Structure formats: C-alpha cells, structure tokens
Image (spheres, grey):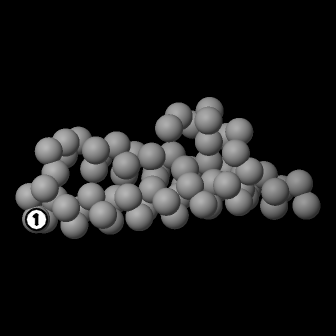
Amino acid sequence: MTAKEIHELSPVEISTKLRDIREQLLQLRLRKQTGQVEKTHELRVLRKDIARIETVLNEKERQARNAA
C-alpha cells in the first residue's frame, strides 16, 4: 500500500486498515514460529505498511489540530 493511497482514505478507514494489517502481522508471526511461512519477506512488507499508515494518520491528526 502506497502513501498516496493512504492519504486518500479517511481517518476512520485508516484506523481500520491499521488494525487489519496488525492482525495480519500477528498471524504471520505465529505461522513463522511454527515454520509454516514460505515468504518471510511479507513480515517486512507488513511492518513498513504499518509505519506508512501511522505516519499518514499522525499527519492528518496534526493538520486537524492546527486547523482548529
């Protein structure tokens, strides 16, 4: 997911997406511990997606505070 796609979402949608991705990361970590993951690079991709989403969410919150 790119930062541009995230910017287009509303804050509620961003929070929902963040929760979903964190759940995916948890499931992937559990599967990795049991040796069921073939594509280990997906862990890194999900962590980076979480960082992108949190960054955009913080930017939107900061803009809302400055506008008020």
At horizontal 89% and vertical 54% (from top left) the residue drawn is 67
Number of marks: 1
Residue furthest toward the right?
68
Q: Quadrant of the C terminus?
A: bottom right
Front residue of this view, candidates 62 and 50: 50
Q: Quadrant of residue 64?
A: bottom right
Q: Give x and y (percent) for residue 50.
A: 46, 53
Camera-side residue: 36 or 21? Answer: 36
Q: Amino acid at mark 1?
A: Thr
Q: Please say if 64 is above or below 42.
A: below
Q: Residue at x 78, y 52 (%)?
A: 63
Circle 1 SS class: loop
Query: Could you tell me which residue is drawn at 49 percent across and 60 percent down?
Result: 20
**Residue 7 occupies quadrant:** top right
The residue beneath circle 1 is 34
The x, y position of residue 38, in whole percent, is 14, 45
